[in-house]
Every structure is written in C-alpha cells, then in structure tokens.
Image (cartoon, rainbow, N blue to C red):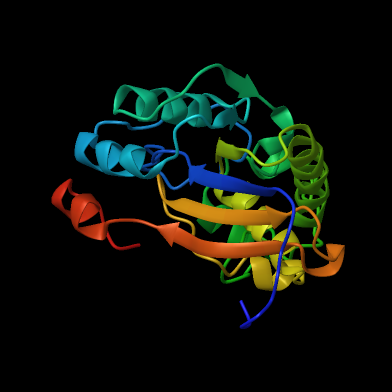
Amino acid sequence: MATGAKVTGAITRWWWVRHAPVPNPEARCYGQSDKDCDVSNEALFRHQAALLPKGAVWYSSNLLRARKTAEHLAKAGAEMGKLLIDPALAEQHFGSWQGLTYTEIAEDHGSNHLFWLGPPEFRPPGGESFIDLRERTVSSIEKITAEHRGRDIVATAHGGTIRAALSHAFNMHPEAAVRFEIDNVSITLIEHFEQADPAHAWRVAFTNYMPRELVLAHGGSKA
C-alpha cells in the first residue's frame, strides 16, 4: 500500500483452501463428480490448520472432497463452528468430458490448452465453461461478503473456484486466471476493503501457500 494511503471500513478476509488430493491413477477428468479425497497427510493438515483464523465463518462446496477437507482441518486443530454448504463454490462442470482421461480429451476433442482442459470460454457438451464458473463463483463471493462483512471466511473449495476468485480480485481475463497454480490443501488469502473504490476493493495477500517439504515427506510430488 502506498505511503499515506488510508483505507477505512470493514476488511473481509477470504481464506481459500483447495481440497485434499483425489486418488486418480487413471488421470481422468472428474470435475463435479463427487470423488473422495486422501486426508492421510496429518502433518500437512496440522500445519495448515494452525494458519487459519479463529472465529471464522466456514463455507464449503457441496462436493465430498471439499467438505471432508474442512472436517479434517477441524480435526487437525482449526477452529470450525457450523460448516455452511454452498453449491456455487463447486468445481467447473465438464459435462460429457467427466470420466474421460485427460489424454482422451486432448486427442479426441482437440483440447490442447496447457493449463486448463480447454479455453476459458469453451463449454464442453452438457457442461459449463470456466467463464460460467467464474460468474457463479463471483455471485456467491459478493453475497457472502455482504452477509459477513468484516469477518474471516474460510472456504474449502476447488482449483477452478479459487482461480475464479483470483480472476475477480485481480479483475483479470479468465485466460490469465487459469495459469495460477493451486495445490491441494494450499491456502490463498484474498481481502475485501468495504469502503474502497469498487474498481480496486480487493487485495491478494498471498496465493497457493503450501509447505512443500511436508508434501514431499508424505510421498507427494512437486507437481
């Protein structure tokens, strides 16, 4: 922040946590398929739980992997009251692509985007585009921010959802937003300043915070 700048009014902080890893040995697109997740990395959960604020409002998407991640953060020491469920925070729905391998999607459907399954404006048959995901995510963010003004909000969600939140905060093109790395169980902190000019009311404190030594010690990879 520039020297001498003054920001008044409530600051609402969103602590985004991506869900724990989904076992996926065949490398299939799962999108909104309700997959389970691996919460066995207890050291990682304890570390991340210690970073989360006390007295926060907790939200999760409706998908099992997000709800289970929130529950295990609480078991690892995070202070969680009632877990509120919001389906608008779910991952992008990839329609008929869900269940296909990433190789099949690339070879049979001509999708060769480096950082996402397709261009942000592309809508797979029966599904939604990343732009659709961004619109529903932003609508939910604005509603929840208004309801819990000045609070800490912990939201366990998905890689696409968190990228959509970053796209909104930075007011960036969706094509740029999908290039963010969002690791499993990583934390991203985004702050909203109530009385700031709406054009720049959001600040990103940090993204994708992940103690990689704990992931590697558990047998994970850097990817």
For this rendering, which residue is in front, 5 or 193? Answer: 5
Residue 36 can be seen, yes or no: no
Q: For the point 49% across and 44% down, which residue is it?
A: 18
Left or right for 182, reference 75: right
Q: Is residue 63 above or below residue 49?
A: above
Q: For the point 70% across and 54% down, which residue is it?
A: 192
Left or right for 111, reference 135: left
Tell me where residue 50 appears, x and y as whole percent. Answer: 31, 40
Q: Quadrant of residue 61?
A: top right
Q: For the point 65% across and 60% down, which residue is it?
A: 166
Residue with the most extreme top position: 82
Q: Quadrant of residue 152?
A: top right
Residue 208 can be seen, yes or no: yes
For this rendering, which residue is in front, 190 or 38? Answer: 190
Number of numbered labels in the structure image: 0
Left or right for 46, reference 32: left
State which quarter of the image contains the N terminus: bottom right
For this rendering, which residue is in front, 32 or 77? Answer: 77
State which quarter of the image contains the C terminus: bottom left
Tell me where residue 144 appears, x and y as whole percent. Answer: 75, 36
